Amino acid sequence: MTVARIDARFAALKAEGRPGLVVFVTAGDPDLETSFEVIRALPAAGADVIEIGMPFTDPMADGPAIQAAGLRALANGQTLAKTLGLVRRFRETDQATPLVLMGYYNPIYSYGVPRFLTDAKAAGIDGLIVVDLPTEEDPELCLPALEQDIAFIRLATPTTDDKRLPTVLRHTSGFVYYVSINGITGSAAPDCNAVAAAVARLKRHTELPVAVGFGIRTPEQAAEIGGNADAAVVGSAVVSMIGEAAAEGLTGKPLADRISAFVATLAAGVRGAKRSAA
Amino acid sequence: MAMAPAQTPNSYREGPDEHGHFGIYGGRFVAETLMPLILDLEKAYEDACKDPSFRAELDYFLEHYVGRPSPLYFAERLTDHFGGAKIYLKREELNHTGAHKINNCMGQILLAKRMGKKRIIAETGAGQHGVATATVAARFGLPCTIYMGKTDIERQSPNVFRMKLLGAEVVPVTSGSQTLKDAMNEALRDWVTQVEDTFYIIGTVAGPHPYPAMVRDFQAVIGNEAKAQMLKTEGRLPDTLVACVGGGSNAIGLFYPFLDDKEVAIDAVEAAGLGLESGKHAASLAKGRPGVLHGNRTYLLQDDDGQIIEAHSISAGLDYPGIGPEHSWLHDIGRVNFVSATDQEALDAFQLCAKLEGIIPALESSHALAHVARIAPDLPKDHIILVNLSGRGDKDIFTVATALGAKL
C-alpha cells in the first residue's frame, strides 16, 4: 500500500468535504503494551492519519512534552525494532489507516537504511518524516524511501521562502507538513490568518494535501486550522495527556480510553471545521 | 582501528566539499526551519572571506583585544623532567578569557555584526566558550544568552558568575544529561524559535556546515602562528604535535596548517575518563561509531539502537559524546593518531605542569600533557613536541581540589 494508502485517505477526506485529523504519539510511551492500546484505538476515536514517534535521546526540534515522551519510552526499553513490531501488530487489524513514522535520523542510520526500509515497508509503514534530513541530504534516506514507494513527507516552515519551496517540495510525497510556527513542537499557538496565507502559498507550489501542525492543542484550534488546511496535526497535547495519565499510574486500556476520549473531541473539532482557503 | 584509506588525498586541507562533507562526515542534518539560515550563513562567511576588510578587522581585534600572537614557549623544566624530547607549549591560555575559544568567538561575532544580527546565543560545557562568547557580545553590545547544562553549572560556578558579570543570561538546561550535548540541543531549539535576528556562535568544530570549516578557519591562527614561531626559534618544523580533543577546535586549530607537512606526526588525545573499558569516558573515536547528531555525521558514543550515550570526563570541556567531523575523517584516513588519557593521568599532568613550569593548565589541556608524559621520555633529545596549551586551569581548581581531597 505505502504511499497509496495516504493518497487514498486524503482522497476520501476530500470526498467527505472535511479536513483530516493527524494524531502523533510516541512509540513505547509510557510502555510498549500501553502504547499499542493507544495506537490501536486511535482510528475509532477519529484519527485519520497516525504519526508514530520514534524515540531519540536528542530530539532537537521537540519541546518538553515530546522530549519527555521519548525519554519515558526509552527508559522502558523502546527500540526502533520494537517500534516496527508495534506497527506490524497494528496492521493485523487495520489496513486502512495511514501510518507515518516520525523522528530523527540517527536511530535509522544505526539500524541501516536498506534494512530499515525493507522492514518498515513489510511492517506496514506508509510514510516517513525525519526532522533532521532536509532536502540537501536527500540521498541519505529520501531517495531510497521513494524507490520503495514509501512517502517522504517534508516539513515546510515559515522560513521556507518561495525561492526554496520548489526545492523542498521536489521529492515530497503523501502530504506536506506545514510547521505553523518558527519553533519547537508544543510551543506557541499558531496564528490562523498567517497559517491560511501560508497554506495558500504552498498550494501554489504543490498539488499535495497540506497538513498543519506545531502548537495545536484544543478542538477549537484544530477546527480553526482545519478550516484552512487539509489536515490538522496534534501531537504534544496528546502526548502530555499520556504523560499525566502515566504519572497517575494508569496503563493499558484505561490510559488508552482517556486518550481516545480526548482524540474524539479533536476529531469532532475538525469535523465541524468551516472550510475556507483549502 | 583506523579503516584503510581508500586513497591518500593530494592535500589534507581541501575539505569540506560544497555540501560540507569531509569524506562521509559532516553535512547539514538540521530541521528545515534552520536550513535557510545555514545557507545564509554559508554565503555570508564566503563573502567575508573574500573581503580583506573583514580579515583586517579580525586581525586588529586578535592583536589588541585577544592579545595575539600567543607565545611559543620552550618548557625547559618539563623537558628536563622527562629527559627525552624537547617540549614546546603554544600558550593559548594567555589569550584574553584564558583559552583558545575567543579566537573563534571574535571571528563569529564580527560575522554576526556584518550580517546585521541583533542577538547572540551559544552553548557551553566547561564555560570557557560561554565566557568567550559573553565577552565578545559585551564588547560589541549585543544581548547574549548562554545555554549550559545544570550539571555543568554546578561544577563550573566561577565561569557562570563570570558570564553573568559580562551581561549574559545563563540558562540552565535540565533536559537529558544536563551537560554539553543537551545545552547544544537547547541552543538549537532557541535558534529554531528566534530565527530572524539570532546568531548562534557554535564553540567547536561540529554542527552543520559551514560551522566545522568556519570554526577551524578561525582557530587555524594557532597553527599558523606556531609554525612561523617554530621556524624562527628552531629553524624547522616540530616532529610531533599534541592536542586534546573533545569537539576538537583547539586541536584542529593547531593541526590544520601542518596537515600537509607529512613529516610532522600528529597526536590527538581523547578523554578516557575512568578508563576506556569503564564505559565512563568521552572517547568517541576509540569507542564510538559513525552517526548523526547536532547537524553532522561523525563518530558518536551510542548504543545499539542509535541512542546517544552520556560522555564522562573530569574535564567538562571534553565531556561530549561526539567529535568534529573533520577529525573523524582524519582518523579514518590515518593522518591523525588518536590516543586517550584518563582523568587520573590528566590530574597528574595538571599538577606536574603547575609545579615544574608555574603554569596551571586547564584540565582539558592536561590530557594533552598526559600524553606527552607518556611519549617524551623515550624520544630522542632532538625530537620536538609542540603541545597546544589550550586553556588555563584557574576554572578547574574546585574540581581538582575535590579530586585531590583538598578543602578550599
Image: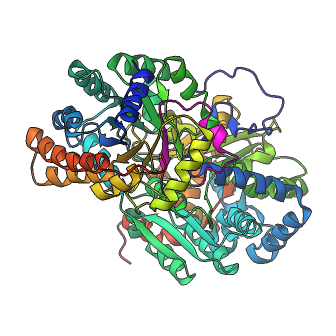
Task: Residue A157: give x, y in percent of width and height.
Answer: 54, 50
Residues in magenta?
Answer: A159-182
What residue is rendered at 59% in x and 77% in y? B143
In the image, B23 versus B243, the foreground residue is B23
- Does the image show residue A212? yes
What residue is rendered at 82% in x and 34% in y? B11
| Render colour scheme | rainbow
A270 is within the stretch colored magenta: no
Task: Residue A195: give x, y in percent of width and height.
Answer: 49, 55
Indicate whether B117 appears above or below A233. below
In the image, B134 versus A10, the foreground residue is A10
The secondary structure that dominates the magenta segment is loop
A161 is within the stretch colored magenta: yes
What residue is rendered at 77% in x and 52% in y? B43
Task: Residue B366: give x, y in percent of width and height.
Answer: 56, 57
State which quarter of the image contains the N terminus of chain A. Answer: top left
- Does the image show residue A216? no
Indicate whether B400 appears above or below A19. below
Task: Residue B401: give x, y in percent of width and height.
Answer: 41, 69
Indicate whether B336 appears above or below A5. below
Q: Is residue A191 left or right of residue B71?
A: left
In the image, B315 versus A106, the foreground residue is A106
The part of the image, by quadrant, that contains residue B259 is: top right
